[in-house]
Image (spheres, grey):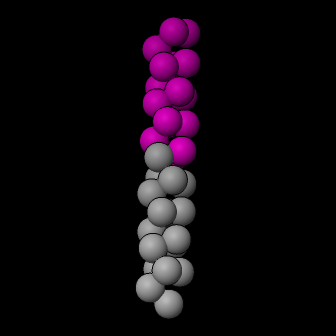
Amino acid sequence: SRISVMKTTQLFKHVRGLCDSWSNNIRAAADTK
């Protein structure tokens, strides 16, 4: 069960990283307009 917790934590960090880069791209696109 400890392995599944680690996998869930990794997945959560990965998703949060994607959200961060996604919002950064939107912010950059808004700045260029």
Q: Is residue 29 above or below residue 33?
A: below
Q: Is residue 23 magenta?
A: yes
Q: Nearer the viewer, residue 23 or 15?
A: 15
Location of residue 22 (image quadrant): top right
Q: Is residue 20 above or below residue 26?
A: below
Q: Position of residue 4 (x, y in %)?
A: 53, 80
Q: Nearer the viewer, residue 5 or 20?
A: 5
Q: Residue at x 46, y 14 (%)?
A: 31
Q: Nearer the viewer, residue 17 or 27?
A: 17
Q: Is residue 32 magenta?
A: yes
Q: Position of residue 33 (x, y in %)?
A: 55, 9
Q: Position of residue 20 (x, y in %)?
A: 45, 41
Which segment is the magenta one?
Answer: 18-33
Q: Residue at x 48, y 63 (%)?
A: 10
Q: Nearer the viewer, residue 1 or 16?
A: 1
Q: Position of residue 8 (x, y in %)?
A: 51, 72
Furthest residue toward top: 32
Q: Residue at x 55, y 18 (%)?
A: 29
Q: Is residue 28 above or below residue 21?
A: above
Q: Residue at x 52, y 46 (%)?
A: 19
